[in-house]
Amino acid sequence: MSVGNGQTGPLDGPGTSGLARDIEQTLHPQNTAFVKRLRQLGIPVKFDDYGPGTHDWPYWQRELHRSLPLLLAALQQH
């Protein structure tokens, strides 16, 4: 799971909408609470709280590239 905090980040350009920042700022506390609860329950989770970044395609794309090998490896085990 990867989340930003809604502050303007390195992949945000002039076209990044205020809505993308608002969404990420709203979701950030919920996402961190979700991960905390998973850990309390003993459910393994990989979590990247990468700081500045918004709920916008450049971040989705970056995180997909980072996580795809992990996801493919998990699928190959079954």
Image (cartoon, helix red, strand yellow):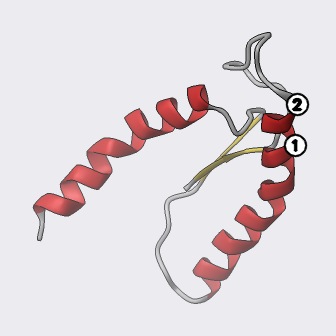
Q: Is residue 67 left or right of residue 10?
A: left
> Please, is residue 38 above or below residue 14 in the view?
below
Give percent across and percent down for residue 69. Answer: 27, 43
Q: Is residue 56 left or right of residue 15?
A: left
Please name the amino acid that badge 1 sits on: Asp
Viewport quadrant of the C terminus = bottom left
> Please, is residue 37 above or below residue 22 in the view?
below
**Residue carrying label 2:** 18
Give percent across and percent down for residue 62. Answer: 50, 30
Q: Residues within 10 Å of mark 1 (few under 14, many from 20)?
A: some
Question: Residue at horizontal 78%, vertical 46%?
Answer: 24
**Residue carrying label 1:** 22
> Please, is residue 47 above or below residue 30 in the view?
above
Question: Residue at horizontal 78%, vertical 36%?
Answer: 20
Q: Is residue 26 left or right of residue 47?
A: right
> Mark 2: which secondary structure?
helix
| 45 and 14: which is toward the camera | 14
Question: Residue at horizontal 64%, vertical 70%?
Answer: 35
Whether the residues at callouts 1 and 2 have beta carbons within 8 Å, the answer is yes
Give percent across and percent down for residue 21. Answer: 83, 36
> Mark 1: which secondary structure?
helix
